[in-house]
Image (tube, helix red, strand yellow):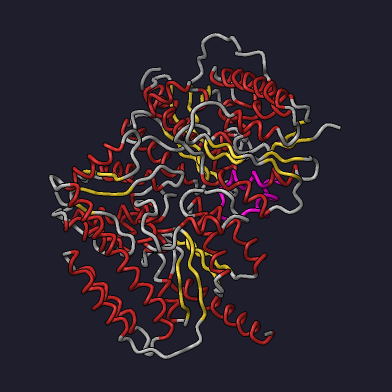
Amino acid sequence: MKVTFPHMGNLWICLNAMLQYLGVETVVPPPSTKKTLSLGSKHSPEFSCMPFKLNLGNFMEASELGADTIIMAGGCGPCRFGYYAQVEHEILCDLGYNYKLVVLEPPEKHISQLLSRIKYITGNRSWFEVIRGIRFGFAKSRAVDDLEIMAMKLRPREKSPGHTDTALTEALKLIAETRRPEHLQESQNNSAEIMKSIPTESRQVLKVGLVGEIYTLLEPFANMDIERKLGRLGVEVDRSIYLSQWVNDHLFMGLVKGLRSSSLYQRCSAPYLRHFVGGHGQETLGGAVYYNNAGFDGVIQILPFTCMPEIVAQSVLPSFSQDTGMPVMTLIVDEQSGEAGLMTRLEAFVDLLAENRDRKKELA
Amino acid sequence: MPVIIGIPRSLLFYKYYPLWKTFFEELGAEVTTSGHTTKAVLQEGLKLSVDEACLPVKVAFGHVQALRERVDYIFIPRLVSVSPREYICPKFLGFPDMVRQCVQGLPAIIDTSINMYRREGDMFRQFSEMGAHICKNPLKITAAYRKARSEMARFDSRVEAGMLPEEAFINREGIPGDGPDHRPTVAVVGHPYNIYDSFININLIKRLEESGINIVTADNVPERLVNSYAGTLNKKLFWTLGRRMVGAAYHFTDNPSIRGIIHVASFACGPDSMTGDMIERKVRRKGNLPFLNLILDEHTGEAGIVTRIEAFLDMVNMHGQASGI
């Protein structure tokens, strides 16, 4: 059994750690590229969202590397992600791929359904080991998020452009290559050292909050590396969703304290969106309100074309922007997105934020 | 003067109108609806909604706008879930919020959440909440709810017997008792607000009828059959409308009297991107049933639709002759 899984940013580091710790052979799909996307788009329903198409592309490419089993998360709606795995599997069947599909999701009838699926993957490992494996994966997700947060702060302040990204790649590699939980702390220290060694200078930076759909926020290929682009333009970025926070909210029911959680955003969204709308629609609104309260200069919403929850959020964001004076930009991505167009829009948006800030200063 | 409650003729109007109308009328309110969708209604909707919204949502905005000035209340319930472990669609969950934030000068809004996700049983609690806007008497509300329920049950049975909703709203006599139908039967599968709104689908139903076609829709299939076919899926479908469409379509592929299937979806519809694919895949695997996938948006042109329907019907007829029906 060679297990593969879809890409979503650095998710592979955590999943790979967990599965390898449990002695499962894994195939990490090649990083998502234009080729992945065109493979996926070619065989996906036209109006399925971009993450669907990329998932499918990942599976097709992983199959070339010998993968024969897919593990995937599921869900129970109303976002269509909950039905991804089943539809993707049907498409793969019709294309002649011979994949076994294991969906990890809240059980329909009984918890034993979920447990037996985990057992299928982990074989005869004890539950104790399985839990340790999951904890290892989670610890890695936190380590990865810490590094990314550092990078987002460093990018607008680095002395030579691109230095942070080189360092981040190196630091992430250290984390990814750690095979045992007991060595993780050491790798974390080393990788933090790498990040700290980046020469910086103190500059005045703008702050932008990224909100929106989780996949497009976490996957740099999907959002065309927006964090880097903004960093180069001298903007410090924060995003409303981090991997570890999502895992904590959804898999551990918020057990781990001290992480920002989606319930904070849900409370913040109250005046504009009073009900959950599936996906991260409510968190998008809540995130925008949160960034406004935290004194950010602007908010960018990212969503895949046809994403239902985010369309609801997008409809409501203009009145938030009007009430608060917070500039909001909406970026919709799909297989037709072009990089040059995004760059132009980002430059214009950052100019607007800088002007806003200068005007505020004059008034003060 | 009775309170005037406006119900937009959009979204789940075609599924629940008799229930809502009877309920509010029994409480002494006057119920009015917006007219049929027109170009003007759509234009208003386009102005108010974001580009990315689907056609039925844009049209729904237009209907709210059309009602806005002539009613005391607009009734746009937040339809989260109408049966256990199922949702409608994220846009229905957020529709009242979208309307509040995007439409200026609204009258009072009744946007009670209807959420049956976690429980079986009836919607009395939600209806008491709705009723409380116009009537404080719980006895009266209970009676009105009962009456509305039985009215709804009669409507459902008329639809199940083969009537289309618009007809079933007016015709209260019951099933037309004509003999066996010799016209070829074509199934139209799609969300009720797409297939019953003749503006959205550019008169699809009428065009088919004029071409001598007998039409069945997913709503004409009894719940029991829908469930047994939807039950063959690897995973329960969590969209109520999607489950009905897939279950009914699977049933149609097994039913030899169905000579073709037309799948109607709005551009960029989320649930349809999944369920449409499942239906199409099923039909293609079966291999010998004419299938037409119509995608609608505000730019859909009449000529294009007519051509495609004609081609589809030619296929249905050819296929019928080949198999000697």
Horizontal side, residue A71 vs residue A221: left or right: left
The residue nearer to you, when weighing A29 against A21, is A21
Is A8 or B41 nearer to us in this picture? A8
Q: Identify the residue at horizontal 30%, vertical 41% (top origin).
A: A90
Majority secondary structure in the magenta region: helix
> Which residue is at a point 39% across and 81% down the rendered structure image?
A154
Decide whether residue B43 is among the magenta residues: yes
x, y percent for residue A338: 44, 68
Q: Is residue B171 left or right of residue A108?
A: right
Residue A193, image x and y in percent?
A: 27, 82
**Above or below for A70 versus B220:** below
Q: Position of residue A127 (x, y in %)?
A: 19, 47
Whether residue B48 is in magenta: the answer is yes
| Camera-nearest residue between B40 and B182 | B40
Judge left or right: residue A19 versus residue B144.
left
Q: Is residue A212 visible?
A: yes
Look at the image and give the residue range highlighted in magenta: B34-61
Q: Quadrant of residue A150?
A: bottom left
- Across the whole image, how many numbered discs are drawn on residues? 0
| Residue B35 visible, this orientation | no
- The image shows residue A354, relative to residue A237, as above or below, that is below
Left or right placement of residue A115 versus residue B86 in this view: left
Measuring from the top left, give residue A269's x and y in whole percent.
57, 57
| x 46%, y 30%: residue | B244
Instruction: Give the vertical position of A288 relative to A133 (above or below).
Output: below
User: What residue is shown at x 38% (from left), y 34% (from top)?
Assistant: B236
> In the rendered view of the protein, which quadrant contains the C terminus of chain A?
bottom right
